[in-house]
Image: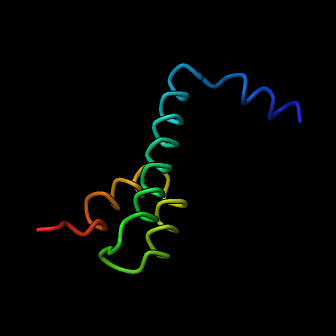
Amino acid sequence: MAELQQALGSINWGLIAPLIIIQFILMITALVDVIRIKDTNGPKWLWVLLILFVNIIGPIIYFVIGRRQNG
């Protein structure tokens, strides 16, 4: 337990916190979009799993590839 506290204490949270916040915002935005949008390129359940489990890259991949463009 002391090793975990020491490891967490040595992390530079000033650099990590913005990345965590960006990841959270991207994930929530992508999940809301995948729920609201009618059609996606592929099954919605797969995009939800990708968004949730592939960290910061999953939502970006969804917005680039998964969203079906109208027009």
Where is residue 1, by image quadrant? top right
Residue 56: x percent and y percent? 44, 49
Front in this rendered view, residue 40 or 20: 40
Tell me which residue sits at (52%, 34%) in the image: 21
Residue 25: x percent and y percent? 47, 41
Where is residue 37, by image quadrant? bottom left
Tell me which residue sits at (42%, 55%) in the image: 30
Counting labels gives: 0
Q: Is residue 26 above or below residue 7?
A: below
Tell me which residue sits at (29%, 65%) in the image: 67
Front in this rendered view, residue 6 or 41: 41
Q: Taking 62 as reference, is 45 left or right? A: right
Q: Taking 70 as reference, is 50 left or right? A: right
Q: Assign the C terminus to one quadrant of the image.
A: bottom left
Residue 2: x percent and y percent? 88, 30
Residue that extends furthest to the right in the rendered view of this protein:
1
Q: Taking 19 as reference, is 2 left or right? A: right
